[in-house]
Image: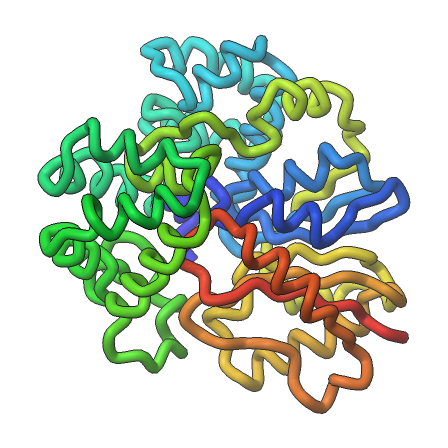
Amino acid sequence: MNAQIINYSQCWEDPKVLLEALDINSNDEILSITSGGDNTLALLIAFPKHVVSVDMNIAQNYLLELKIAAAQSLSYNEYQEFLGVTESNMRLDLYRRVSSRLSNPAREWWSVHESHIKVGPINCGRFEKFTALFARRILPIIHNHKTIKQLLSFNRIEEQRTFFKTRWNSRKWRFFLKLFTSRFILQRFARQRGMFSHANIKNIASIYERRMERHLTSVPNSGNLFMQYSLTGKYGDSLPPYLEQNGYDKLQNVRNTSLSIKTGNLLSYLKSMPDSSFSKFNLSDIFEPLSELENETLWHEIIRTAKSGAKVAYWNNLVKRSYPASLSSQISTDNKFVSELQSKDRVFFYDSFHLHTIKK
């Protein structure tokens, strides 16, 4: 894992779906994958008893530290400006006020990665830079600003569906979408190689084309921060929970003891924990790069460290992964509820959302 690279400066799993699925309460002890930090923060400001945020890449954890430190050091407008929601040429000046709240290793890391701060920390990830390149350089070749803005404005799916079919879904759109979602391009410029190691799919681009069409004809774009960022390189009329005024206010009141940040392999971390440690799990798409044997081993540790009734949430992308059949007696799933949640998901590129309850 290259600790000099932030792969994701935002989370690309819908926090609304996650929060509804996990239904956080004040007694919850949560394990969360850090990634861009956004969903760990969404869980944290729901005021559970404790959150442990784990990532193999220490740079991702330094980003989480920075997002918290910024909320506790800056005014709300400065906070948005510093992180990259709004334009600014003052981010390095603002960083000097934030840095004193960072751990020494995080401060040292950010001091040699000032270029990430200059573009706005939410925009510095490898995936976000790739997305912004498509939005700002390629999409204007396909559609003009007015057409893009109109697609993003719909809150009635019938109107959006018609617009997509008659105005948006051109040959040029399909060509560039397939090009930018091909295995070669994604592997080289957007995602880590390991995420494709078990994806035995010849034409990945066609899968993403179908998912994009399904999404644009079934989920309204108005208020969809993920589609807004994908097509403009900026958030629109919606923000992740921690970046909203209410979320920022809550971060002011988060106790230092409410969050632990751990760097390392998830399996190794779980093996170090006692039985029945966690009541909720946000596992992102952690199973994607795992072999079937690794997947099974991890599930054994998830169940061992889960409290009775614990909820486990995660997404599948190109690799279909779930708990092994041998553990089915210890896991239950409300398929109707999961389907309802998946129908609300504002991110187009995942195959499926999963939520299970551990039975002990």
Residue closest to the eye, 22 or 40: 22
Q: Nearer the viewer, residue 152 or 311?
A: 152
Q: Can residue 75 be seen in this snapshot? A: yes
Q: In the displayed structure, does residue 153 sit left or right of residue 63? A: left
Colouring style: rainbow
Closest to the observer, 242 or 91: 242
Quadrant where the C terminus sits is: bottom right
Q: Quadrant of residue 1?
A: bottom left
Vertical order, 230 against 319 (above or below): above
Please count the marks in the image.
0
Residue 246: quarter of image: top right
For residue 124, say whether it is visible.
no
Residue in view at x 33 percent, y 25 percent: 119
308 vs 212: above or below: below
Q: Which residue is located at x 66 percent, y 60 percent?
A: 313
Q: Position of residue 89 (x, y in %)?
A: 32, 11
Spot the residue most to the bottom: 326
Residue at x 32% of width, y 58% of height: 213
Q: Residue 5, percent across and down?
A: 37, 45
| Relative side of 126 to 286, left or right | left
Judging depth in this view, the residue of 10 and 357 nearest the camera is 357
Instruction: Describe residue 190's horizontal placement relative to residue 19 as left or right.
Output: left
Question: Image height check: is 193 above or below 154?
Answer: below
Q: Is residue 218 above or below residue 43?
A: below
Whole-percent x, y for residue 42 in the image:
65, 38
- The image position of residue 65, as x and y in percent, is 59, 33
> Residue at point 46% right, 66% down?
351
- Left or right position of 234 against 342: left
